[in-house]
Image (tube, rainbow, N blue to C red):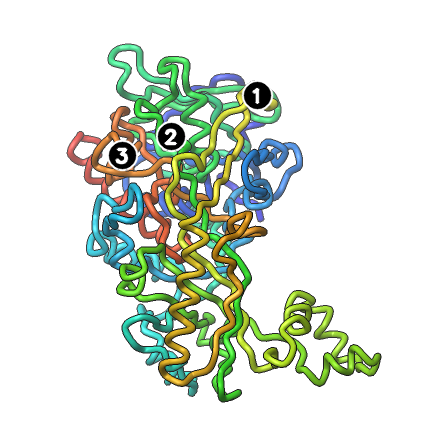
Amino acid sequence: MAFDSFADARSFADDPGLEADICIMGAGAAGITLASALADSGLRVCLLEAGGMDMDPVVEDASIVPDIGRPYDVTANRLRFFGGATNHWGGHCVRLEPDDFEPKDWIPMSGWPFGADTLAPYYRQAHAFLGLGEYEYDPAPVARALGTRLMPFDGPMLKSQLSRYRRVFYGDEYGPRLDKAANVRVVLYADVCDIRLGEASGETVSHVVVRSPAGNRFDVRARYFVLAAGGIEIPRMLLVANGQRPAGLGNENDLVGRYFQEHLMFKSGLLLPRDPADVLPLYLSEVPYGEIAVRCHLVLTAEAVRARRIGKFRSEFYSLPLRLRDLRALRSGRIDAADIAGLVSDPFGTARAYRCGSNARHDTYGLFNNIEQMPNPASRVSLRADKDAYGRPQAQLDWQITRQDHDCILAAHQVIAQEAGRIGFGRMRIEIDPEPEVFLDGVGGGGHHMGTVRMAEDPRRGVTDGDGRLHSVENLYVAGSALFPTGGYPNPTLTITAMAFRLSDHLKARAEREGLL
């Protein structure tokens, strides 16, 4: 898709001297939402995107980030073109819970600088922006409307959580609005290579230096600047901007790039209901619901998390593809085409069923665990000696998994087992080794890069304040999940979008106070 008013930086003459009131760097979920919220505001907005409208190998090569810690395919989760990572987002939307914003004495550096009530009106805006239907996350009325029921875990330890799904490619969905907005200028192939402070005080950004793959360079000057380039690129941009501050911008307390967090994803465990009718489609896949889809997950309550002193836990379920009789047929060579299709579609589940013997049936839930990773300063993005095509140090990721992360799944499975037995639902097979050689060996991530430019009211605990402004740079802001002190269990896109709306209100109010509106 092409938009007539979008500019291509490759065609610019060197240093045309672009000017704006607000310069947003990065056109993913955060940047596009913020620019959309500022459209028609009366403020001149310049939205810079390092890529084009589609994947371009020349640009994508700049996304390569080596992992020097736990194996992690960083590059697969980063898309450098208009829309960013929303171009492969699954559309999963659910809010953070009230306790996610609260400090917890067993989770280091936890606690957001504001509570759930602060973000509540912006969640509603984000919900409408994404076209998610009625603002309802209680699964009971949705299950009734669908003519189904919920799993019977409704006590103080476990509950069903409803998620809404609508796959929105932000570039395609909201590009037309930006294209028509007279006050918004989108510049593609515009890679920000440096952030320069004004010479007078050194406390405000005067301009950013931009280069394109064609080799030309130019500056963008603005009153306010917003970094919205993702949880890997934002810390790199701040660390690379070390010409005037040797440690990089915002890094006075060595926090930039630290506390990298993911939503840990790990297949382990089996839940066997007594009654096969308790295997419910609403928990196994997305179910159509009006213009969107919905799905239920099993989560630990805030009370269970406090009692066990662990992170937040959510489990998706999948069903095993073959019954025991099919496995016997497989052993004897008597298996039909439908069984082979099932085998091919989920070889992991088939192998699990084979290993579990008589306990494994088609009416068994397999658990795909999604957990909140503990904030850890050793889990970090840093710079390496290798340079990219623009001469900037490349980023590298040292992703670390701790015993706390491992024990979260073990404790959660113990809770599920106890509750399943207590209410007579069935049995739980726990497969987490309490004393492993490697914590969560084979764990993956959801592509949710959080925490690397964390916010906190105390500069010793965060790079930015609660508005996303760098403590040490008066007019430089951050948008996106890099701000999250902790991640809870939800996919971060809905929260990223809500926070971008909140930042829009803040910037408009500040611009009005300072005479720009």
Q: Horizontal and vertical percent for residue 503?
A: 28, 43
Indicate whether 237 appears above or below 282: above
First in sequence: mark 1 vs mark 3: 1
First in sequence: mark 2 vs mark 3: 2
For residue 256, which numbered disc appears in the image?
2
Q: Using residue 295 as the reference point, say whether residue 514 is left or right of it.
A: left
Indicate whether 149 appears above or below 133: below
Q: Which residue is mark 1?
A: 390
Mark closer to the observer (2, 1): 2
Quadrant into which the C terminus falls:
top left
- Tell whether label 3 touches label 1 (CB within 8 Å): no
- Tell whether label 1 touches label 2 (CB within 8 Å): no
Query: Disc 2 on helix, strand or loop?
Result: loop
Mark closer to the observer (1, 3): 3
Mark closer to the observer (2, 3): 3
Q: Which residue is mark 3?
A: 461
